[in-house]
Amino acid sequence: MKRLGKGQKPPKKVVNNGKKGKTDKKPNGGLSGGSSSGGFYYSFLTVILLFCLVQITISAVLNISKIVSYKAKIIQITNTRNAAQALNMQLRDNIKNFSNVTGLEAIARNNLRMSSEDEVMVIINTPKEEPAKEKPKKFGIFGN
């Protein structure tokens, strides 16, 4: 820039009003807040963004519900596994106990109702009470 002396005035700026064949194009591609096409464009973008926001919200809710259900299934499967391991341990102990003669004898006495050669087994059966029979309902006009 030049330095101005005492009697010098700054040069005047020339403003082009666009009268000499130049077109008025805006730097943002002709989209302004006041034009109808720009308003439609921004409205369209707003609708698209709201749609995306709704999709994100729905997917987040579904993912959270899946996480909760999967955690419940994991807990159920863990409990089932622990019960199966306990049963396996019990069966291993039973195999160890029943592999000797006294274990086999206990099975024979309790489950198969057997006795040894020098024993007498007495089985006392108690009669089971049967429920009282109901009279059959009679159908028809005369109750036959």
Image (cartoon, rainbow, N blue to C red):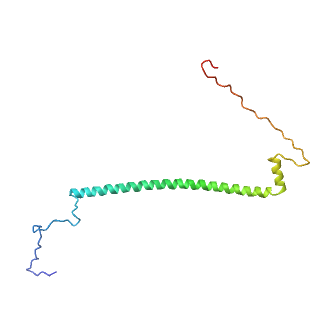
Residue 71: x and y in percent read 55, 55
Quadrant for the C terminus, please.
top right
Please state, as top left, top right, bottom left or bottom right, where the N terminus lies in the image. Answer: bottom left
Q: Quadrant of residue 101?
A: bottom right
Image coordinates of residue 106 in percent, x first then y, are 82, 51
Total labels drawn: 0
* Among the 4 quarters of the image, the one containing residue 43: bottom left
User: Where is 131 relative to 111, above or below?
Assistant: above
Q: Is residue 84 left or right of residue 66?
A: right
In the image: residue 26, left or right of residue 123: left
Residue located 35% across and 54% down the image: 51
Front position in the image: 105 or 38: 105
Q: Residue furthest left?
A: 7
- Residue located at (27% from left, 58% from top): 42
Q: Position of residue 109 (x, y in %)?
A: 83, 48
Look at the picture and state if 59 lies above or below 129: below
Instruction: Judge left or right: residue 33 versus residue 135.
Output: left
Please report the residue visible at 40 percent of the width from the left and 56 percent of the height from the top: 56
Coordinates of residue 127 in the picture (x, y in percent): 79, 35
Residue ID at (31%, 56%) = 46
Between 97 and 6, the one nearer to me in the picture: 97
Placement of 132 over or under 54, stated as above or below: above
Q: Is residue 10 above or below residue 55?
A: below
